[in-house]
Image (cartoon, rainbow, N blue to C red):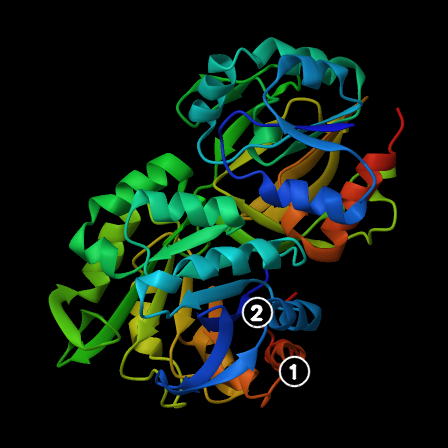
């Protein structure tokens, strides 16, 4: 069973729909129930909006520890703010993250309104390492992004892919049982669906 | 490199996609799910649904459409038309919309944009601006270009971004339906004043218009309805033409 963690931040229906599409027979739960998250085989940790709100809402539902524990031992997919939250600290509101991935979250700076913020649209994802999650996906494939902040890792060896906007930034992190992406696979058409399908089959 | 986006716009009323010229003589153009799938297969980067239902009785039908499209089409979906309050936005997002476009309600109640972006995040709040040229500036209009507001379009765009709009959809009421190209002066005037992406809309008659919308109008995305609905061009042809003009597309 896959648990999509619902902590009140954003619409999880498209993530749910995308998993139903790629694995119609798999049980998928959108949940904020600690017990279901603990017993799930796989965890999807999404996030939308502002990181300070996400951190607060996760804590309000007593899910912070549950997520930190779940991220220790089973296939764990972070999406968008779900990636950013894994880091130590964010410039957005100056909040601490979950501290699972050593790194910081920084804001894109725009010069003369040229490169727009948010970074919104389809951009190329350049692979930094081979990973089961990239199976069936071309290197340099485009995925759909929408974000104003990006992750700056302390340990570059954890980067699974980069994208260039203003400068290269890490758009996918892999560490043991964790894979987390800045883009939205559930909105990235065929390549995104392939990545989600890979997640349903990834064994660690 | 970030690709410039092509966004087909589907006008929806009473649960069906319709096509017509300036909302007159509407012809049934088919099932929204089938049309959404067709554009998705052709490589559309996003889809925009504009609910033009006149009576409030049938407004709920757009919800059903978005739910059905979101089960089968995995690209971003924007919905606009008749969005008045926070609850309208919540309902559309829950149905599967990724972004909600606010137009007239933003003028009657600008704080709606601030509240909505705080509640749901700027990334899902699009402000639609309908503008008309008046002497040497552009003025914001409502109700399909019938009602002037006295508001300067460029300063309005800046205010909407300050209030949290994550994207602006700019429609030239002078060009809409004329097939004479976007108002690129309007779009570039706004694009060079705001940090968020802008979508150019209104006036596309051929594929060069799309190219000029990006190169001259400095738009981040181009929206078109009739050239795609009437089958004059496919999305693939539009992208090929943009690529030939050295515009990065997906």
Question: Residue tagged by mark 1?
Answer: B237
Q: Residue at x 33, y 72 (%)?
A: B171
Cα separation, mark 2 vs mark 1, equals 22 Å
Q: Disc 2 or disc 1, which is closer to the eye?
A: 2
The quarter of the displayed image where residue B102 is located: bottom left
Label 1 neighbour load within 10 Å: few <14, some 14-19, many 20+: few
Quarter holding the N terminus of chain B? bottom right
The quarter of the displayed image where residue A40 is located: top right
User: Quick one: SS at disc 1?
Assistant: helix
Q: Chain of mark 2?
A: B
Is B236 situated left or right of B9 in this image?
right
Question: Residue tagged by mark 2?
Answer: B32
Q: Is residue A129 among the parts visible in the rendering?
A: no
Question: In the image, residue B10 lies at what x, y percent?
Answer: 49, 72
> Is B193 situated above or below B235?
above
The quarter of the displayed image where residue B26 is located: bottom left
Q: Residue at x 29, y 60 (%)?
A: B103
- Residue B44 circle label: none
In the image, B119 versus B163, the foreground residue is B119
Q: Earlier in the sequence, mark 2 or mark 1?
A: 2
Is A186 situated left or right of B111 in this image?
right
> Is A20 situated above or below B51?
above
Q: Residue at x 63, y 82 (%)?
A: B234
Question: In the image, residue B53 lies at what x, y percent?
Answer: 37, 69
Q: Is residue A150 among the parts visible in the rendering?
A: yes
In the image, B199 versus A90, the foreground residue is B199
> Is B14 situated above or below B159?
below
Quarter holding the C terminus of chain B? bottom right
Q: Residue at x 48, y 79 (%)?
A: B18
């Amino acid at each position: 069973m896959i648990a999509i963690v619902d902590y009140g931040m954003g619409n999880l229906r498209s993530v749910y729909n995308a998993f139903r599409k790629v694995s119609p027979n798999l049980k998928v739960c959108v949940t904020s129930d600690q017990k279901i998250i603990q017993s799930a085989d796989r965890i999807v940790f999404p996030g939308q909006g502002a990181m300070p709100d996400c951190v607060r809402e996760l804590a309000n539902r007593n899910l912070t520890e549950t997520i930190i524990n779940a991220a220790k031992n089973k296939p764990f997919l972070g999406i968008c703010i779900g990636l950013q939250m894994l880091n130590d600290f964010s410039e957005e509101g100056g909040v601490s993250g979950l501290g699972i991935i050593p790194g910081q979250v920084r804001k894109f700076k725009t010069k003369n309104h040229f490169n727009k913020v948010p970074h919104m649209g389809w951009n190329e994802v350049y692979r930094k390492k081979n990973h089961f999650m990239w199976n069936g996906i071309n290197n340099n494939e485009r995925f759909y992004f929408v974000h104003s902040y990006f992750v700056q890792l302390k340990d570059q060896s954890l980067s699974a892919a980069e994208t260039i906007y203003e400068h290269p930034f890490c758009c996918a992190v892999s560490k043991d049982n964790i894979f987390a992406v800045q883009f939205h696979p559930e909105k990235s058409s065929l390549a995104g669906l392939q990545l989600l399908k890979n997640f349903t089959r990834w064994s660690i | 490199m970030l690709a410039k986006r092509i966004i087909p716009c589907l006008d929806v009323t009473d649960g069906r996609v319709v096509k017509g010229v300036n909302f007159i003589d509407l012809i049934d153009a088919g099932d929204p799910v089938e049309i959404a799938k067709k554009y998705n297969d052709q490589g559309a980067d996003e889809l925009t649904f504009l609910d033009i239902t006149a009576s409030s009785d049938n407004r709920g039908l757009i919800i059903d459409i978005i739910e059905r499209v979101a089960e089968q089409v995995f690209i971003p979906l924007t919905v606009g038309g008749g969005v008045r309050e926070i609850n309208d936005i919540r309902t559309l997002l829950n149905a599967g919309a990724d972004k909600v476009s606010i137009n007239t309600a933003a003028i009657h109640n600008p704080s709606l944009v601030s509240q909505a972006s705080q509640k749901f995040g700027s990334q899902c709040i699009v402000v639609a601006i309908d503008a008309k040229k008046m002497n040497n500036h552009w003025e914001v209009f409502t109700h399909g270009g019938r009602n002037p507001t006295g508001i300067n379009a460029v300063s309005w765009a800046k205010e909407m971004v300050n209030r949290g709009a994550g994207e602006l959809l700019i429609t030239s009421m002078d060009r809409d339906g004329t097939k004479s190209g976007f108002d690129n002066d309007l779009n570039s005037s706004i694009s060079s004043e705001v940090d968020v992406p802008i979508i150019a809309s209104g006036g596309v008659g051929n594929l060069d218009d799309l190219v000029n919308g990006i190169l001259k109008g400095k738009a981040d995305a181009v929206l078109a309805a009739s050239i795609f609905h009437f089958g004059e061009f496919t999305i693939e042809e539009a992208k090929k033409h943009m690529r030939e003009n050295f515009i990065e597309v997906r």
